[in-house]
Image: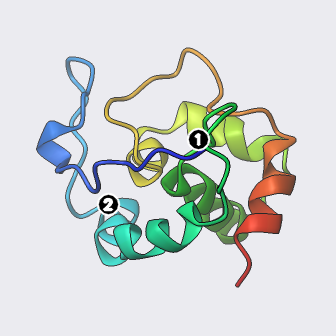
Amino acid sequence: MYKFDNGQISLEDFGQPIGMNLKNSNRWVKRAQTIPWLEIEKKYAKLFSNKKGNVAKSLRLGLGARIIQAEYGYSDAETPLQIQENPYLQYFCGYKAFDDSKPPFDPSMMVYFRKRLTP
């Protein structure tokens, strides 16, 4: 099962703890604005024809994690930890607010992201 996301949020709408100010000039903010998330998401959603069961991770999180992993060469285990700790990476992956309370997904999900999100 797959649920569509609401698309790119503005940096001003991204929930930030007091004292944290993300900058529009950051490369991850700029990159997030150049990717046609909605167009890719429409194709991605077709991979999930079953209307029952667990809801799949969003395209934004899966593709974002794959791009981050490729950019830095992180392992499958390190990628979700880096996303957990970095507000810019969370913004890039479609979070609505910074949340470092837990990793965004189990490292084993990177295998599924690779299978579903091919070049």
- Above or below residue 28? Residue 100 is above
Residue 101 drawn at (x, y percent): 55, 14
Q: Calculate the distance from the C-alpha at mark 2 to the C-alpha at mark 1.
A: 14 Å
Graded by Cα atoms within 10 Å as few (under 14), some (14 to 19) or many (20 or more), the crowding at tag 2 reads: some
Q: State the SS at label 1.
A: helix
Q: What quarter of the picture does the C terminus occupy?
A: bottom right
Residue under numbered circle 2: 29
- Give the residue type that dot 1 points to: Ile
Residue 64 drawn at (x, y percent): 55, 59
Q: State the SS at label 2.
A: helix
Q: What quarter of the picture does the N terminus occupy?
A: top right
Please say if the residues under marks 2 and 1 sit with CB atoms less than 8 Å apart. Answer: no
Identify the mark at residue 83; answer none if there is no mark: 1
Graded by Cα atoms within 10 Å as few (under 14), some (14 to 19) or many (20 or more), the crowding at tag 1 reads: many
Which sits in the foreground, 73 or 65? 65
Decide if residue 72 is on the left or right side of residue 12.
Answer: right
Residue at the image position 58 percent from the left and 32 percent from the top: 84
Which sits in the foreground, 3 or 57? 3
Hey, which quadrant is residue 74 in on the image?
Answer: bottom right
- Give the residue type that dot 2 points to: Val
- Above or below residue 55? Residue 94 is below
- Work out whether residue 73 can be spotted: no
Residue at the image position 46 percent from the left and 42 percent from the top: 90
Outermost left residue: 12
- Above or below residue 1? Residue 18 is above
Residue at the image position 55 percent from the left and 47 percent from the top: 2
Q: How is the image coloured?
A: rainbow
Decide if residue 49 is on the left or right side of residue 74.
Answer: left
